[in-house]
Every structure is written in C-alpha cells, then in structure tokens.
Amino acid sequence: MINMQNYWYSPAYVIYMAEELAKIYGQAIIDRDTVFQRVGEMKGSAILSLAMNKVDGHRYFMQASQEEFPDVFTLYQEEIVGKNVDTKYQTVEVVEYRPMMQKGVAEFILDSKLINPKKAYDEQTIIVCYIRKFGTFIDFNDLYEKLKSQKFKPTNVYIVGNIMGADNLFQVTQVWPVIHHEAIDYVERTKAYPLPHKMFFKKGVSKKLDYKVGSTSLKTNSYEVFNLNEEEVKKKYGKK
C-alpha cells in the first residue's frame, strides 16, 4: 500500500543516495547483502524513470515499498484541463539479472516474473529487468518473439543495462508490447533533473502544479530513502 505520509523522491536523488551508501559500505556489499536489496531495485527503477522523463517530459517521483509487493511505487502528475491535475501511480517490480544466472534473459524474465504461477501481477504492473551481469548480450528481436509466445498480464516490460565501455551510459529498452531503445547518460540526466528532489503528495488533490508548495529542504539520509533500519545496518557493519 502506498504511504502518502512518507516522502516521495526524484530518481536523481535516489541514484545519488545509492551512491552515498556505496561509499560507506562498498558496492560489493550493497550487491551481496539482501538487507540492501531495495537499493538495487530503486536504482534500476530510477534509471528507467530518467529514461521515461527524457521521452515524455513527466517529472517522476519514487517511493520504496514497505511490503513484499510491489518493489517500488512511482508517480507523476499532468495537467488535464485548466488548473486540474491528474496524479498517475505505477507499481514497479524489479528483477536483477546477476552474474550467476544461467538462463537467457528472456527465459529469466518469463520464469521469474511473467509466467511464474506464484506471481500474480496485474496489467498495470511495470516489470523491470536490471542487468547486473557484465557482458550480457541480448537479441531483442528474439526476446520479443519469446515473450510473444506466452500469455501474461503486465503490459509494460523493460530492460535496464549499462552500456559496455561507458560507465555513465545506460540503455533502457522497452521489450513489451513494443521494442523501443533509449540511451541515457544517467550522470548528466541526474544533474539536470528539475528540483525539488523530495516532496509530499496528497491523494485526490487536483490543482495547478506547484512544486515549491509542499517541498522540503534536502536532508541527506540514504537509509530513509530505501526503508533501511539505520541503527541495525550500522551495527552490523561497525559503522558510526
């Protein structure tokens, strides 16, 4: 369930906070310890949101889920008529394709999310496969045909992966219901992302967008962004 009492963060801020945690604990620990699982899920979703912002111009905000499903909530607002606005919410499920994976990407996405009998995602759930296995090659046409041969409910499936040889470049590919590629320099897009990076939103409020109202000054707290228990994590790794 979405918690409207919690802050919503821009994808730029989420990426920045993920990097702050990596400075403290090291990327290897962030990737390995399941206590940090939401960090990878939020970062993958944030990169997707940056790409979507590039395409549609919407200003996306994010919130880590506090429950098993979904992994991430996102929202954006758009003006409809006059001063009215419509707030669009999305549920995002992220699956990470890691070095130990033996299946191809298409089979992995299908088995882990799309046709897994233990998963019951609706049409509106966005599925994101975050590629963490270096050197992964994807034949997108073949992947699309494999998805096409199955029946599943989610109507938006994406793959997010770092472009080899370019640390700042990511390719975000929509693989269902159509194939569409967007290459983004996530560092530059993060720097250019519009303020504010942290806001409260209220459901059912339709008025002209004003991002200054309700925004707050930033207070760096990576643990809050990813719903981490700061005291427990610091104690586990001997941090003050």
Image (tube, rainbow, N blue to C red):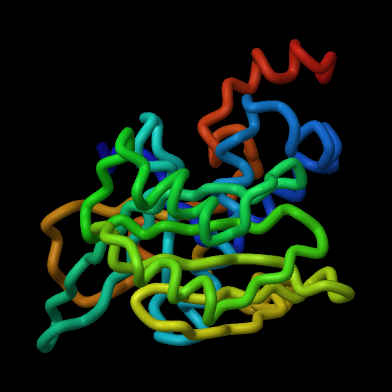
Left or right, 95 with respect to 166, comes to left
Residue at left offset 34%, top offset 77%: 177
Extreme residue in the right direction: 165
Dividing the picture into quadrants, the one containing residue 220 is top right
Residue 152: percent from left, percent from top: 27, 57
Q: Residue at x 84, y 14 (%)?
A: 238
Q: Which quarter of the rendering shows the N terminus?
A: top left
Q: Residue 78, how many percent across, how many down?
A: 25, 78
Q: Residue at x 60, y 56 (%)?
A: 130
Residue 228 location, x and y as percent?
A: 57, 27
Eyeballing the image, is 204 above or below 189?
A: above
Q: Is residue 104 above or below residue 42?
A: below
Q: Quadrant of residue 157?
A: bottom left
Whether residue 180 is visible: yes
Q: Quarter of the image containing the C terminus? A: top right
Nearer to me, 4 or 237: 237
Image point 62% across, 42% down: which residue?
A: 39
